Image: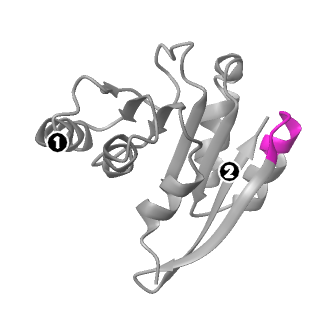
């Protein structure tokens, strides 16, 4: 039995700058920063509750200097040029496709996209492939009796 957050973290390339879209509690970012795997992170969510949870958790681990929390819908924020990895975990595939499709210009510096798509993952794969992203690594896990298909795409 695997821990979903730890398995997603394994797919995030080392020494990258990550934007975690739909961060919720920022557990993935905290895992990545505490393990010193990534250089910096942006925790993005569109709801006030998750934003407050993320802020509280990041403060609890004294990671404020390594992470910025942003309230935004999908990729509708000022995506910094240093971000080279996007994470979409726990979201529906059609929602992810819409987020990216509405902001294709922001993919200019993105080298990796890590997904944990809960519906329509085949459509996401086809869509990302049309944008030049290829499956770099994928794993199937079971966490709390639920199956997950985790994928890292690379450009």
Q: Nearer the viewer, residue 10 or 44?
A: 10
Is 68 left, or right, of 95 in this rendering?
Answer: left
Quadrant showing the C terminus: top right
**x and y percentages locating residue 59 in the rendered image:** 14, 35
Residue 132 is a magenta residue: yes
Residue 91, visible in the rendered structure: no
**x and y percentages locating residue 12 in the rendered image:** 56, 46
**Which range is magenta?**
127-134
Residue 126 is a magenta residue: no
User: Which residue is drawn at the image coordinates 70% and 16% (left, top)?
Assistant: 105
Helix or strand or loop: what does disc 1 sit on?
loop
User: Which residue is drawn at the image coordinates 42% and 71% (left, top)?
Assistant: 3
- Give the quadrant of residue 64: top left
- Give the quadrant of residue 144: bottom left
The tally of labels here is 2
**x and y percentages locating residue 109 in the rendered image:** 67, 19
User: Which residue is drawn at the image coordinates 37% and 43% (left, top)?
Assistant: 29
Q: Earlier in the sequence, mark 1 or mark 2?
A: 1
Q: Mark 2, residues whose alpha carbon is within 10 Å: few (<14), some, or many (≥20)? A: many
Q: Which residue is mark 2?
A: 152
User: Which residue is drawn at the image coordinates 73% and 46% (left, top)?
Assistant: 153
Q: Which residue is mark 1?
A: 61
**x and y percentages locating residue 150 in the rendered image:** 62, 62
């Amino acid at each position: 039995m695997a821990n979903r957050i730890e398995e997603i973290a394994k797919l995030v390339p080392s020494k990258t700058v990550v934007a975690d879209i739909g961060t919720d509690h920022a557990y993935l970012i905290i895992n990545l920063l505490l393990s010193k795997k990534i250089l910096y992170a942006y925790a993005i969510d569109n709801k006030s509750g998750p934003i407050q949870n993320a802020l509280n958790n990041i403060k609890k681990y004294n990671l404020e200097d390594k992470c910025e929390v942003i309230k935004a819908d999908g990729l509708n924020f000022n995506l910094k040029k240093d971000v080279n990895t996007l994470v979409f975990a726990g979201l529906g595939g059609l929602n992810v496709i819409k987020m990216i499709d509405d902001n294709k210009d922001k993919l200019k510096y993105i080298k990796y996209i890590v997904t944990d798509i809960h519906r329509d993952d085949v459509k996401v794969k086809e869509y990302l492939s049309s944008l030049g992203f290829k499956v770099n690594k994928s794993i199937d896990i079971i966490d709390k009796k639920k199956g997950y298909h985790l994928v890292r795409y690379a450009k």
